[in-house]
Image (cartoon, helix red, strand yellow):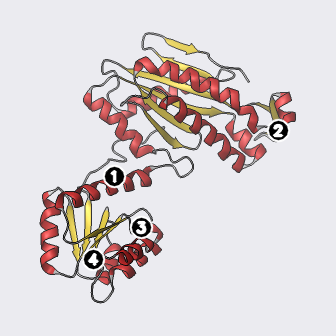
Amino acid sequence: MILSTPERYRVNERPDRILVVEDDQNIRKILSIQLEGAGYEVITAEDGQIALDILQQVTPDLVLLDVMMPVMDGFTTCRMIRADRRHAHLPVIFLTAKSGPESRVEGLMEGANDYIAKPYSQDELLARIKNFITWSRAQRHSNPLTGLPGNPSIEKEVEARIRDGRAFSFLYFDLDNFKAFNDYYSYMAGDGMIRLLARVLQEVVSEGAGPDDFVGHVGGDDFVAISTPDRSRDIAAEVIARFDGEVLEHYRQDDRDRGYVVIQNRRGELEKFPVVSVTIALIESIDGEITHLAQLNDLVADLKKLGKREPGSVMVEDRRSSDALDRTGSEG
């Protein structure tokens, strides 16, 4: 599958969960009421060791942590949380009466994302919690190579447009001859090629971007962009022009001159592989033609097959009434 289906991954099936670590019973109760009133699920712990035990069983979306506690103080607790790789992107906010600058610096040095002094503003606390949970989710879903949003975010963007009935264009980008390039030059060079497409795509989409524009990284050498029908063809043409204009910089001079590399194929035979190019599948949903992700997957798969039959960089467009192949860019 090009994208996972809604049944395989659903975003936000449960309320965001907050672990409150606070030794004062009254403050724990007040925080629980305020957070639950804001729609959060709340778990409480009266000291740091209990919090660490809970984290072995449950993964919250944020930890709200006091500093002065028995058994294990907040600074030590935060350091232990950060020592666990599973919690690398878990937001931790100190909420404490220790408001001096030295304590703030120590808390941040131990890995906390924020430090709020008591007494606190409820509205400010809720705003900070919301911002850090949003940031953390984006970090978890982003591709580590490019930093672009991954499949869960892509699905969420598509499903929102389908649900709202908005007209949109979906562009799927896939590199041709990438495996041969990767095998010939090394995986590090392959990562450079992937970053090239990511950069070009981000630059093109950001120029004149509107509120409906989005760029995501499916994985490997596959990317998507979501835009409006009036911008999509210009985006595709400009991505091809810029990618084809820079791709040869990733080749040695002798390979540039030949216009191909020679490697051994799966049958053990020497084979010529052209310069890496990009195939773009363009699908529009103007009057609600796209109704679910599986339908989009099928259309993308069919268009990619059509485009990869052609040499060089191409855009293949689904027009419902007839198959259309828009050939733009070089045939390198």
- Residue type at the position of mark 2: Arg
Please rate how many residues cluster around mark 2, counting C-alpha atoms within 10 Å: few if below 14, some from 14 to 19, many from 20: few
Q: Earlier in the sequence, mark 1 or mark 3?
A: 3
> Mark 1 near mark 2, Cβ–Cβ under 8 Å?
no
In the rendered image, the residue lying farthest to the front is: 101
- Residue type at the position of mark 1: Thr
SS category of the residue bearing label 4: loop
Q: Earlier in the sequence, mark 1 or mark 2?
A: 1
Question: Nearer the viewer's eye, disc 1 or disc 3?
Answer: 1
Task: Judge whether 233 appears above or below 92 on screen.
Answer: above
> Mark 3 near mark 4, Cβ–Cβ under 8 Å?
no
- Residue type at the position of mark 3: His
Residue position for label 3: 87
Name the spot of residue 321 as percent of width and height, x first: 43, 10
Please rate how many residues cluster around mark 1, counting C-alpha atoms within 10 Å: few if below 14, some from 14 to 19, many from 20: few
Q: In percent of the image, x 31 and y 64: which residue is there?
A: 62
Give the camera-side residue of 150 and 301.
Answer: 150
> Mark 3 near mark 2, Cβ–Cβ under 8 Å?
no
Residue position for label 2: 252
Q: Is residue 1 among the parts visible in the rendering? A: no
236 relative position to 283: left or right: right
In the rendered image, the residue lying farthest to the top is: 321
Residue position for label 1: 134
- Residue type at the position of mark 4: Asp
Q: CA distance from mark 1 to mark 2?
A: 43 Å
Residue position for label 4: 66
Question: Nearer the viewer's eye, disc 2 or disc 4?
Answer: 4
> Mark 1 near mark 3, Cβ–Cβ under 8 Å?
no
Give the camera-side residue of 91 and 10.
Answer: 91
- For residue 115, the mark is none
